[in-house]
Amino acid sequence: MDFKILGPSQSVVQQNNKLIIKTAEAEAHVTVYSPSIIRVNITRQPADADESFAVIREPENSLAYEETDAEIIIKTTALTLRVNKTPLRFAFYTPDGKLLSKDDDRFGTNWQNSRVINYRELQPEEHFIGLGEKVGNLNRRASSFTNWNTDASDHTPKTDPLYETFPFFIGIHSELTYGFFLDNTHKSYFDFAASCDDQFIWLGADDGDLNYYFFGAQTVAGIIDDYTWLTGRMEMPPLWSLGYQQCRWSYMSAQEVLDVAAKFREHNVPADVMYCDIDYMEGFKIFTWNNETFPNPKAFIDKLKAMNFKLVTIVDPGIKVEEGYQQYDEGVERGYFATYPNGENYIGEVWPGRCHFPDFFREDVREWWGAAFTALIEPGVEGFWNDMNEPAVWNQNMPWIVKFGDKFMPELRNVYGMQMARATYDGTRKILGNKRPFVLTRAAYSGTQRYSAVWTGDNTATDEHLLLGARLVNSLGVSGMAFVGVDIGGFSGNPTPEMIVRWNNLGIYTPMYRNHSIKDSEFREPWQYGEENLNLIRKFIEDRYRLLPYLYSAFYQTTQSGLPVCRTLAIEYTHDKAVYYEDYQNQFLFGDGLLVAPVKSTELTAKVYLPCGDWYRLGTDEKYTGGREYVVDAPLSDMPVFAKAGAIVPMQNVTQSTQHSGDGTLILHVWNSTEDNDFVYYEDDGNTYDYEAGNYHKRSIAFSPNEKTIKISAAEGNYKSKYNLLELVLHGFDDAIHLNKLNFNNDEIVIEY
Ligand code: GLC
């Protein structure tokens, strides 16, 4: 085993905005991306081109440094990096000299053969959050993780790795915060002081560079803002994708899909989306339709549209080896598939049997893939579900000798799914013209938020998975992925009636609300559990539709700052230790104003922790003083949700689909407080990119208990709101205030009470 530790600096040279420090073992390249983002790339193979799948920004800061005999010092307004020269070690401080994070003095960065690992000093009582789709506790301390995108069907709440790779975490200690993003696509490792007598944390990868971005913002939200500045933010999702989505592996025919859709309307259960899982295809061949069971896709989708449903269809990367099948013939002829080093196309087995796998790392292959969506879009599909893209092959072990272009599988596996989602997004966006595509992917890497939503794969119908789902969604949110779903009800197994009820209650507060289940499972639609449960589930789904104006505004916030829709309490209450306790770690804020406490279906009371400030139970307006734990009722009809004092939550009346225009009334809920608060309300047509040209309706809503006013600013943007009346509902105010409906046009509205 060749073992090397980064040793003393031998030379320091500035090249444009990059500082290059050479040692006998490697070079360290330091660049300042912004005052709060410094990149350090420790490389043994300096490359001419700087490639990243995740990062979309260039450094915005010029570089200035001081050098002494012992140190190199780089100072920005937000960070100080002190580089010890002998041996080369990196330490990050706040501008006023508080230590944020540093290399372990002894071990720093080192190599065992090609494997590069960085050892970092553990700080007093340090907590860690993030890493995206990882099981375990909110606080990652004392746990270790591997990034290696895996088809983790039948995973448990302890399985690692799952499907996605987000090598980004946030460290929290001494009332300080920092972020760390290791942009390396090889199999990577993060160990948060799991087995080392609390001496250090360590992280690194099987090969490649120790290429990281260090974030110095002093709030978690600020770090997420910077991380999503660097890796991109999602764009506004189509409004319909925020409605209720019904899936199953599989509705076996067009008629069955239509019958289920019709039942939603019959039972008055709001819903927007139906799915076709793999059985809509001919022999699982991507971009085909089964002639017998889906004989006329256009007529089928037209009927769905007439019921105000959208259709999402699944696509997998595996292209069936079968002469005469267009994708196979074209792919082989043009050399579009992953190969062995001798040029033979790699074959692995997935649903269709023996398959080739498109090389999504090539632009021409992505374009070819993207253009093929015409077969789905022409008849009317608007959502594209990318599955099995870890990439999954039966027995889970694509050989390491498989090549994509000149690179081998181990270097690219973790980004394969992301590149498939990118090809799908780019292609469908082009074909759909001005309409927003909805793309969903199972495998992902940092930056995937630019192209797609994700879901958390094949979970199970247990209460542990219900709670785990909340944590996965929240952790993905910390890692830039705000648009996330879990299979409501659990993919494998059959939920009890109580469980499906509870899980639907949580579904309201999940960014993507999709019910999905495995082949041969019991049917899962809301009416399958008797009248009483149907009434409960209907009420939850109705609540989701009531909340859409609030939810859509929360997504707008994500597009602007990366702040996710579902926010672990660690984002807002970072230094409150209680939010990391196992009892409370599943709780989260849904948007700015609502706190959700997920509860198992078997428990009808719940221990909840309300952080500092006042809170009101949603539904009853019972008031609680925060900063402590409460035991509260948690009947199946009402999982505990609390509005924060001062919360501003715009709602609407129920519609059966987001495509119904509704009754034109925006219902503004405000919970009393002693402190001022405001909210950005955002609306657009929900369907096109016209908002990019100013076609939106945006206003700020300011609640001032001190002035006793609620002020809604004049509208910004050219879009005419679909609401023309405003109704105000005040909670927790002493005087019963009754206000008639007000006109909601573009003018400023001032309400005094
Ligand atoms: C995978 C997916 C699941 C899907 C199934 C069949 O297991 O994770 O969601 O239903 O494949 O396509």
Image (cartoon, rainbow, N blue to C red):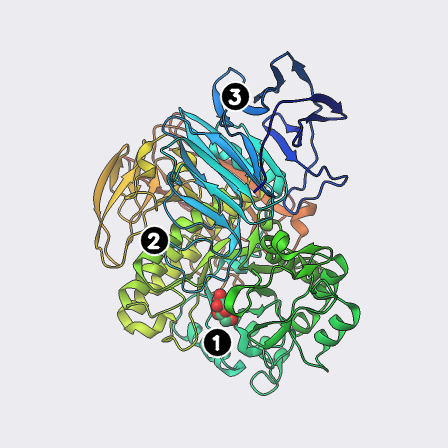
- CB at disc 1 and ligand 1 closer than 8 Å: yes
- In which quadrant of the rendered view does residue 232 lie? top right
Callout 2 crowding tier (Cα within 10 Å): few <14, some 14–19, many ≥20: many
- What's the amino acid at mark 3? Tyr
Of the pair 405 and 652, the residue shown nearer to us? 405
* Residue at x 61%, y 45% (from the top left corner): 207
- What's the amino acid at mark 2? Leu
Res. 235 in view: no
- In which quadrant of the rendered view does residue 214 lie? top right
Tell me, yes or no, whether the two marked residues, 2 and 1, touch with CB atoms within 8 Å: no
Q: Secondary structure at mark 3?
A: strand
Question: Label 3: which residue?
Answer: 93
Instruction: Name which of mark 3 and mark 1 comes first in the sequence.
Output: 3
Callout 3 crowding tier (Cα within 10 Å): few <14, some 14–19, many ≥20: some
* Residue at x 57%, y 39% (from the top left corner): 182
Callout 1 crowding tier (Cα within 10 Å): few <14, some 14–19, many ≥20: some
- What's the amino acid at mark 1? Ser
- Residue 724 place in picture, x, y as percent: 52, 50
Q: Secondary structure at mark 1?
A: loop
Instruction: Please tell me whether mark 2 or mark 3 is closer to you in this view.
Output: 3
Res. 142 in view: yes
Question: Label 2: which residue?
Answer: 467
Of the pair 635 and 517, the residue shown nearer to us? 517
Q: Residue furthest bottom?
A: 292
- Residue 346 place in picture, x, y as percent: 66, 68
Instruction: Name which of mark 2 and mark 3 comes first in the sequence.
Output: 3
Q: Residue furthest right?
A: 334
Question: Label 1: which residue?
Answer: 250
Q: Secondary structure at mark 2?
A: helix
